[in-house]
Image (cartoon, coloured by chain):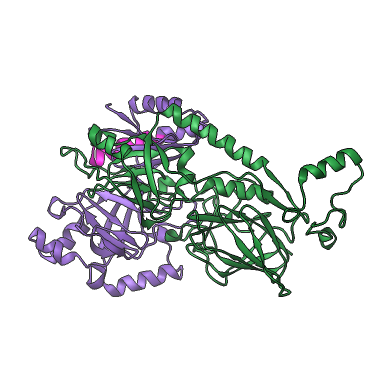
Chain colours: A purple, B green
Amino acid sequence: MDIRVLTLGDSAFTIEFPKLKGAIGARSVRALRHSIEQEVEEGRLPGVFDIISASRSLTVCLNPDLADYKQVTERVSALAQMPLDAGGANKELWILPACYEGEFAPDLEEVAQRSGLSVTEVIDIHSSATYDIFLIGFLPGFVFMGEIDKRLQFPRRTSPRVRVPAGSVGIANEQTAVYPWESPGGWHLLARCPVPFFDSTWAQPSLLSAGGSVKFRPVTTEEYSDIKADLSSERIAPQSFLSREGES
Amino acid sequence: MAAVLKILSPGILASLQDEGRRGYAGFGVPRSGAADSLSLQLGNALVGNAAFETAIEFRFLGPKVTVESGRLRLGLAGDVTAEHKGADGGDSVSIKPWQSVTLDEGDVLTVDPLKNGATGYLTIEGGFDLAPVLDSRSTYARAKLGGVNGLPLQAGDRIPTKLPHPRDGLERIVSDPISTSTKIIRVLAGPQDDYFSEVEISKFTGGSYKVSSDVDRMGIRLEGPELESLPEKGSDLISDGIVPGAIQVPGSGQPIILFVDCQTIGGYPKIGAVITADLPLLGQLMPGNEIGFQLVSLEEAQAARKTRKSELERAISSVQDYFGEGVMDLKALYEVNLIGGVVNASLTGHFPGHLEGGANEKN
């Protein structure tokens, strides 16, 4: 497979599959990540402490006191050129409540106008598809998913919002995502999801993982508030939105 | 009972920081950690701590703290001065940079505004007694990780420490501290240096960039020669991984150095990344500073890292006991001991200016 190795300072490098994108890119990245993680676990890549997945590349961070930059680069390049095995496909399916109403959906009408669809059609299109989870990154627990219907594909907003509320469900280009934290952001906001995506006390701090899939279930404002209250009082667990377990 | 430090006023952007979080970037968690890791390490050496023990980091304006119970020794790291006012209401004493100071219960330490750098530290002998979050006590407020309840320090915060009182009665000073101010930042080209023509790259390395007022732990925005990416490449790429020190060039052409709290992936081309040896220097950049960039090779970056390490070791080995202004000379003390062999340096009265005489008895 075609790869490029890109320098990112003296303690990180990025390995890129320049010809891949979308779901295939995400799958190759996941497979390479899996094989690097295995090497790290078996002690063959000392000093490697972080691996950052992107949609068609991986960034490997190393401690230069413990790792030889050139050796690690060569070893990871060799791994990338081997036949990649995604390692037990993740079959997890999450069905997540999303409220496409009122203040929770500030860009819904604009998206409808730009796509020449009705608001109801936009909601139907966005909530009827099952999305692949491409990667987690950018912010803790931020999940990039796709691909969304071509009719809903628009570039990011020209002027990003200074404050996007936590739980906002957005779309940009071919992807959709949920903002796990309040942060600045340039995605078009269609809905709000009450489920927390990240908790440092969980065994795996991110609720979702790359390779699984997500479908949004439209809920009313009332249902949204009920679910949010049930989650915060721990009457229901975030894990209860997992509708199909993964196979290992 | 362990001593408790209370924050009377937090200053600007005061937070707890250590070496930062490693191993969680795959979940989107930023690295965080000290903005100037050299000052943190040297400040910890000053109070006898492990290199990356958690400390209070502050930017531009320092905090005001007191000890609510017990006694504790703090180290002033960076270009940090402070006023120490005793609980008994006497005159306050000025504490110089790179000195330790012991606070009795009720004493107040007011850190002065920083004059020659952006970041200072208060290190705490023995460290704070706080549970790590994702293997680190570094504060990352957006996701409420680390620190005190995941937040920047607030007035009224009470932070438990591990020791009830200092291990001994001696103050210490770094007599030959490391300099973390700079005008030249060394950079390795990539990952997207191929987005820029040679002309643009020489603008980047030949020009002078002013640090804008937009400086924080997430990034350092610069003002200087605009860098234009090649028209066929544009300034929007398929997002890839970023690390602190990466220099991204958005459509405006004005570079931004991503810093310790930066996101884990980004979609702007990165012309280069600051070498590990120079990362701590970024923590001291103040708005208005002029800097230039110098491209180096991987080998030069590795050599620079070794040099930096030995500079830090030399500074750490210059930590010595401090008996007060201009009175005591450690070398003289050793000579007295060497020749006489009978002088007990911890005995009060042997040496004029021995500030902490008798402190051992109180422990």
Give whichever of A50, B92 is nearer the camera.
Answer: B92
In the image, residue B342 above or below residue B118: above
Q: Residue at x 57, y 43 (%)?
A: B178
Judge whether residue A20 can be spotted in this image. no
Q: In the figure, B4 relative to B21: above or below?
A: below
Where is residue B72 shown, x and y percent of the image? 70, 61
Q: Is residue B220 left or right of residue A41?
A: left
Report the side of A190 relative to A95 (left or right): left
Q: Is residue A12 above or below residue A174?
A: above
Q: At 50% from the left edge and 51% from the top edge, which residue is drawn? A: A203
Decide which of B224, B41 is in the foreground and name it.
B224
Give the x, y percent position of residue A199. Answer: 45, 58
- Highlighted range, magenta: A21-34
Q: Position of residue B77 (x, y in %)?
A: 59, 53
For residue A235, say whether it is visible. Answer: yes
Work out which quarter of the rendered image holds the N terminus of chain B and state it. Answer: bottom right
* Residue that extends furthest to the front in the rendered view of this protein: B326
